[in-house]
Image: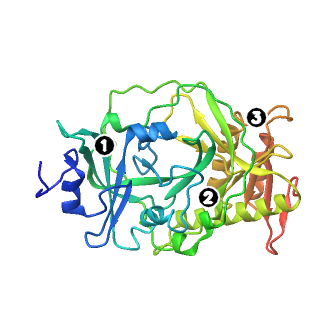
Amino acid sequence: MTASVVEIKPGDVRTRAEIRALFGGSPQGGICPSDDKQSVNLYSDPDVGEHLGYYDGWLAEEDELGPVFEYTGAGKVGDQTFDGIAGSGNRAILRHAEQGRTLRVFTRVGKVPGSDTKTHRYLGTFALDGTQPYVWRRIHGEDGNERNVIVFRLRAEGEVQHAVQDVIPPADETLAEFVPFQMVTAAMFQSDPATSGDLPLPKPRTPKRTTSRGVAPNTETSGTFVIPAAFSARLSLRAATAATVAVRHEAELTQAYRARLEAAGHQTGAFQIKVKGLTSTLRTDLYDATDHVLYEAKGSSSREDVRTALGKLLDYSRYVKSPGHQGEPQRIVLLPSAPDPDMYDLLDRYDVGLIYRSDDGRFVGDAVI
């Protein structure tokens, strides 16, 4: 193989030297920005990722916009960050649209015969999901310690290879692990250079292709208590849509009530839930570990959002267990304003409480701290 490559198409296997000839970037590292090629090249190594406690790849479960590719940020030890030198690669991904760069994903497949030169398969071009560009996830690191990692949610831009071997493996065992709340430096999620800028808005999905792959049974789960770090991320978008505005309002509302709980001496966090047979990871909005209360926040008080919050609470609360507390947690919907009157009756029917923010900024409702 030589570095004089005319074109690289999804599915093609190339060395890093050949990739750099077209798309630039550094000769090593997982996140490789290139100014002159207007590219951010993302290299994934399945063996390394599994060793470090995570998987990069396609989620088997699709949402209304289609498939999502998850890519874990940079940083092998300790909490990942968007701040400083350690967070430079993660900032490059988060700000790719603002800086006019395209995300290109490659996965390692082997080596050139007779040498130690690694080869990588090209998956195609991507962009960050416009409404949820990344999530925080709690994993066990290489040193055995728990840490917070940034998991970017990528959407296909143009032609991509969606191969079966690149799908994240489903959860195959139950592991219920309670992790106390740990404070994280504000720079991880409040740094203006990291969290401001333009993100691409979601595109309408294309028709889903049929597949013969079966769906594994979803009979067991694992839950992990983690910090709700993503709540503090404030995204400035070029073109606001109802979805993106709601996401921002939800984050601000949750952060405000979380601050209220912590001011009262309560331990707060969230639950991270892996469901057996699924590749995706569920995450609750807010959990009060002191009083065993699970909150689901919404960015608007519309009928649709109240019903969505109700459904999530009924789903998530089945898996939320905490030492020192018996049974399922108290369930409360957190809203930015009062909903329609009949929504109170709906929530009461399922024994779900309601807290909302009044016009003067006060929180009103059930069990307000």
Q: Nearer the viewer, residue 4 or 234?
A: 4
Q: Which mark is nearer the camera, 1 or 2? A: 1
Q: Give the colour scheme of this rendering.
A: rainbow
Q: CA distance from mark 1 to mark 3?
A: 39 Å
Which is more N-terminal, label 2 or label 1? Answer: 1
The residue labelled by disc 3 is 321
Amino acid under disc 2: Ala
Amino acid under disc 1: Arg
Using the image, tell me which numbered label, if any, was put on residue 337: none
Binning the other alpha carbons within 10 Å of mark 3 as few (below 14), some (14 to 19) or many (20 upward) gives many
**Farthest residue, direction front:** 115
Secondary structure found at label 3: loop
Number of marks in the image? 3
Q: Nearer the viewer, residue 133 or 16?
A: 16
Residue 178 point in image, percent of width and height: 72, 38
The residue labelled by disc 2 is 230
Q: Nearer the viewer, residue 4 or 238?
A: 4
Secondary structure found at label 1: strand
Amino acid under disc 3: Lys
Residue lying at 51% horizontally and 33% vertically, measured from the top left = 278
